[in-house]
Image: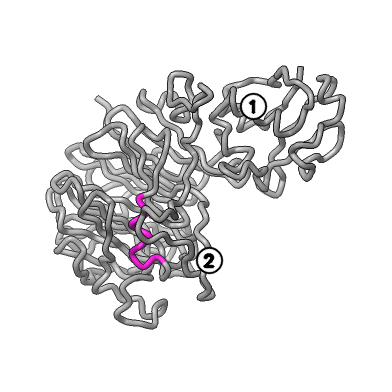
Amino acid sequence: MIRIVLPAHLRTLARVDSEVTFDIPSPVTQRAILDALEARYPMLRGAIREHGTLKRRAFVRFFACEQDLSHESPDTPLPDAVATGAEPLLIVGAMAGG
Amino acid sequence: MGAVPSQGIARRSESAVASQTSSWFGQVIQRSDDGGTTWDPPGTKPEDLMGPDGMPKGESNMFLYNGSAETGQPLTTHQHYDGTQRPWEFKRVWHLEPSLTDPDTVYAGAEDAALFKSVDGGATWKELAGLRSAKGQLWQPGAGGMCLHTILLDKSHPDRIFVAISAAGTFRSDDAGETWKPTNKGLVSKYELPDPDAEVGHCVHCITVHPSRPNVLFMQKHWDVMRSDDAGESWHEISGNLPSDFGFPIAVHAHEPNTVYAVPIKSDSEHYPPDGKLRVYRSRTGGNEWEPLTKGLPQQDCYVNILRDAMAVDSLDPCGIYFGTTGGQVYASADAGDSWMPIVRDLPPVLSVEVQALP
């Protein structure tokens, strides 16, 4: 199972308390994860990715395995540890946005 | 999203819609149908509006400018501070105004200035693009951005809509928002607009109207308090004896159409009350003659501002008046302004105040 950690405000918006988990077939990419996340929690549409372009919002970052994956292509496979659920994908509001 | 400031909240009966934005997560619209106890983004529950894949569409925060040919005059740029043209870009919703007759119809004023309408309780939004055809290429941002901040609806003229934009001016539609005309004749902005007869480009901060006199409007402009007696066709100044004619909000008494409230601040570069004294001014003559209202308000060392959407009146008798400050206080008067008391302190800067009288 893929594990995703949302920032506090989006947990409130989506009404979840902790990590959210999904069963996503290979390849596990940013796009696949966000498609699943927004399908289950449509109130998050536009909050992580821009409407229409689906580009990552400027002050949102993606981290996993101690790496910043924000500038990776959304179709690049994520690290194996994320795909196996050993590590979560962290969606983080950038400090610059505060 | 508890830490995100609300920028527009509007109430009719038990329902309310609220606008929240943040630089992280953008625009969020939320709706309450139980008097504000619980909130949800409209259109995101399983039983709501569905897309072709069977999932809720979740488009309550999607505001797309309509530049299609069907609007007649699609516009893609507006003026910037430096005189260049910039593309229209959605930043946030500044104001929400529910319909006076339909609980599922809501209007939204946005930055970059545009008017949007929802007919499904805020689940989806469509631009009334005819507005930007009213010389939109000459509109420009004020210091706070190019924002459509005030929307006035009229029960006696159901197809009439007034909007106010910084810095473009006021505009009126008489066909439910399809077509618009600038209504700024008589506004003077000699320091901001070199052309004394400029039809658009004025920085209007707020307009208000009493429902019993739909053709009489009051305006707080970037300098000058103004009045129109002909539905915006012309304006004249009513600043009179105010200590400063700069300010943001303006309100009219719920039962006295000629009683108007303003909150002067020192100047365009000093957004705090003159002499550090927080005073609401009331005119019982429709302008020109103003009296300071000070009882219960701080009269020294007070350097807060009151933003354009942060003042409201209720429908009770006597009329209650409320305003919030950038210092995080909300003051209320139960006697039409004769006396005031703080009802909450230590909030973040108050952007918007709305009032609902519950049974």
User: To which chain does the residue with label 1 belong?
Assistant: A
What's under tag 2, amino acid-wise?
A: Arg
Q: Residue at x 71, y 44 (%)?
A: A94
**One can see residue A87 in this view:** yes
The stretch of residues the image draws in magenta is: B128-136
Name the spot of residue B336 as percent of width and height, x first.
22, 46
Q: Main secondary structure of the magenta part?
A: helix
Q: Residues within 10 Å of mark 1 (few under 14, many from 20)?
A: some
Q: Residue at x 33, y 43 (%)?
A: B97
Q: Using the image, determine if residue A98 lies above or below residue B87.
A: above
Left or right side of B42 for B258: left
Is B132 colored magenta in this rendering? yes
Name the spot of residue B271 as percent of width and height, x first.
46, 63
Name the spot of residue B1 as percent of width and height, x first.
55, 33
Same chain? Circles 1 and 2:
no
Say which residue label 2 marks. B86
Left or right side of A85 for B80: left
Say which residue label 1 marks. A37
Q: Using the image, determine if residue B147 lies above or below residue A39.
A: below
Q: Secondary structure at mark 1?
A: helix
Name the spot of residue B24 as percent of width and height, x first.
63, 43
Mark 1 and mark 2: Cα distance apart in space: 34 Å
Q: Nearer the viewer, residue B186 or B107?
A: B107
Q: Nearer the viewer, residue A30 or B294?
A: A30
Q: Secondary structure at mark 2?
A: strand
Q: What is the number of the mark on residue B161?
A: none
What's under tag 1, amino acid-wise?
A: Leu
